[in-house]
Image: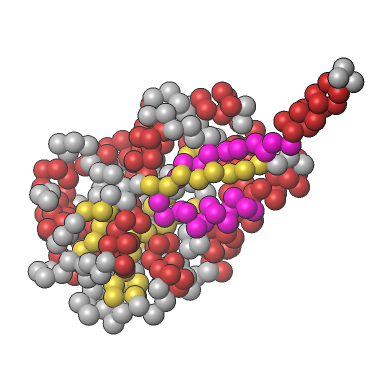
Amino acid sequence: MKTLLPIIALVAAASLQAAPTTLLNVSYDVTREFYHDYDATFVKHWQAEKGDAVKIDQSHAGSSKQARAVLDGLQADVVTMNQDTDIQLIADAGLIAPDWRTRLPDHAAPYTSTIVFLVRKGNPKGIKDWPDLVKSGTQIIVPNPKTSGNGRYSYLGAWAFAKAAANGDDAKAQEFVAALFKNVPVLAPGGRDATNAFVQRGIGDALLTFESEALQITKIFSPGQFEIVTPSASILAEAPVSVVDQVVDKRGTREIATEYLKYLWSDEGQQLAAKFFFRPRNQALLEANAAVFPKLKLYTVDETFGGWAKAKAHFVDGGTFDSFYRP
């Protein structure tokens, strides 16, 4: 029996060494397909570089809902959100370092998108630009801007367009956005929920959503059934990422979590972003895909709203959105 004990100990040690490191990526709900492929690519990269096994788990829902889940204890090693405020909310609670925006390039956002309109084949309502969305009898599907980054960007894109058309008049912009939301029959909690309402349940005449989601629908999920209308102007949607410092330090995963995010800027990471219809930061790659990503005027949250710290006043309880929206 004594001679077996060292052998058992060695076997147990080998089993522990063979167990893969796990990471949890908490993300928003329209990145499922992208991160499914990206995770597999990163696993191969990490094993080739370090010789270690790694397993990536994913969690997806509305961006703001995901941020609150992390605050409530969801043990995310990394967060990959679609708006600054969701990561900043976690940082304000002390789980992420205050300098998170400057630890990675491009304000820590490896790719971008914008808001476009998805309409049914033939565009029966003749929707061409933002003003067509406020016409009587037109139903618009959009995620709830209080729970979804997709919804917030849709709201801000409409506001930015209307504000520019009104020579900077925010009161006129609010009237326009209020008229648009009067045409919204139901607010979905997240972007993929809104897609399901429009695509699967057949509700509405136009879906406001990220360009990446609209392209996936028209080219992969339901080719031939829908069309994309790219407005004359929209909002620049940056998708920031960060390690969750408190979690990676507790779990000992900082090195691999940091590399997981940095690899999003690699050639492979950028090519995958373009493949899944996110606008890559790699300018040459973006220009090579000009047929997929048409040029349009893109307003930024900073220039139109004074940054996310001010823009979020639209969406807090009792804020601008609550002042005019009635279910």
Placement of 26 over or under 137, stated as above or below: above
- Boundaries of the magenta span: 18-41
Q: Which residue occupies 27% across, 39% down?
A: 312
Q: From this viewpoint, is residue 40 visible?
A: yes
Left/right of residue 309 with respect to residue 103 in the rendered view: left
Placement of 317 over or under 123, stated as above or below: above
Count of labels shown? 0
Q: Which residue occupies 38% across, 66% down?
A: 214
Q: Position of residue 152 (x, y in %)?
A: 29, 49
Find the residue positioned furthest to the right.
Answer: 3
Left/right of residue 139 with respect to residue 226 in the rendered view: left
Q: Which residue occupies 29% across, 75% down?
A: 120
Quarter of the view holding residue 8: top right
Q: Which residue occupies 65% across, 33% down?
A: 255
Placement of 17 over or under 56, stated as above or below: above
| Camera-side residue of 212 and 23 | 23
Q: Position of residue 66 (x, y in %)?
A: 38, 40
Find the residue positioned furthest to the top.
Answer: 2
- Residue 302 covered by magenta stretch: no
Q: Position of residue 112 (x, y in %)?
A: 45, 54
In the rendered image, which quarter contains the N terminus?
Answer: top right
